[in-house]
């Protein structure tokens, strides 16, 4: 699989940097953001394939960020991470277009599998769109 462009969004700096290093070691291109506002700024110049974002953050929360990402960049897949289980938040995230919702702590291999799955879905959707445009 080719490298995945990933934006990690989490207010827990140690978690963010550790996960970023592990993803980079797998050959992925990784950008980090410690807030929703910072993430939106990064997305203006970084063409992410997948965003991994924390649900609970100070300032802009993960659901608000998810909504804004899907409005402006609908092809980006978003995986929501949380340390605070909530069925309501999970349902709302899926309604807003999240690819999946995972509980922290999450095993790296399980998260990486989900990341690859989200990337494959994005690539497949882009191929379908290109085929439709080509056949016009």
Image (cartoon, grey):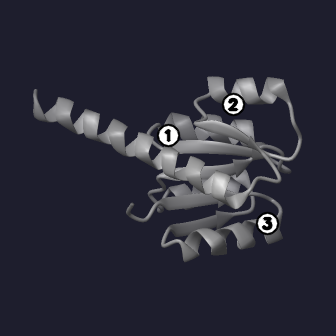
Tell which of 60 and 14 is nearer to you: 14
Residue topped by disc 3: 15
Disc 2: CA contacts within 10 A as few (<14), some (14-19) or many (>=20): many
User: First in sequence: mark 2 or mark 1?
Assistant: 1
Secondary structure category for the residue under label 1:
helix
For the question of whether residue 1 can be seen, the reply is yes
Q: Which residue does the image show at 50% across and 52% down from the upper left? A: 116
Mark 1 crowd level (few <14, some 14–19, many ≥20, 10 Å Cα): few
Mark 2–mark 1 Cα distance, whole angstroms, equals: 16 Å
Q: For mark 1, what is the residue?
A: 72
Task: Report which quarter residue 6 is drawn in.
Answer: bottom right
**Image-based side of 90 in relation to 109, left or right:** right
Where in the figure is residue 34, as x and y percent of width and height? Answer: 74, 62
Q: Nearer the viewer, residue 57 or 23?
A: 23
Label 1, label 3: how far apart the Cα atoms are: 27 Å
View extreme (right): residue: 84
Q: Position of residue 117 (x, y in %)?
A: 50, 45
Task: Identify the residue at image location x=58%, y=47%.
Answer: 114
Residue 123 position in % (x across, y down): 36, 45
Position in image of residue 39 (x %, y %): 64, 56
Q: Height in image: 109 above or below 72?
A: below
Local secondary structure at mark 2: helix
The answer to whether any part of residue 39 appears in the image is no
State the residue position of label 2: 93
Residues under numbered marks 1 and 3 in contact, where contact means CB atoms less than 8 Å apart: no
Which of discs 2 and 1 lies nearer the camera? The answer is 2
| Tag 3 secondary structure | helix
Camera-side residue of 30 and 67: 30
What number of labels is visible? 3
* In the image, residue 42 above or below residue 116: below
Give the quarter of the figure containing the C terminus.
top left
Image quadrant holding the N terminus, namely bottom left
């Amino acid at each position: 699989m080719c490298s995945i462009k990933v934006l990690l969004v989490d207010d827990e700096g140690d978690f963010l940097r550790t996960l970023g290093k592990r993803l980079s070691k797998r050959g992925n291109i990784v950008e980090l953001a410690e807030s929703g506002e910072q993430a939106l700024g990064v997305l203006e110049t970084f063409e992410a394939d997948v965003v991994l974002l924390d649900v609970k953050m100070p300032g802009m929360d993960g659901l608000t960020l998810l909504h804004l990402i899907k409005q402006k960049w609908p092809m980006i897949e978003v995986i929501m991470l949380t340390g605070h289980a909530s069925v309501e938040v999970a349902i709302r995230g899926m309604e807003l277009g999240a690819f999946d919702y995972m509980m922290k702590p999450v095993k790296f291999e399980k998260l990486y599998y989900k990341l690859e799955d989200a990337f494959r879905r994005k690539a497949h959707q882009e191929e379908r769109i290109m085929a439709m445009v080509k056949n016009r």
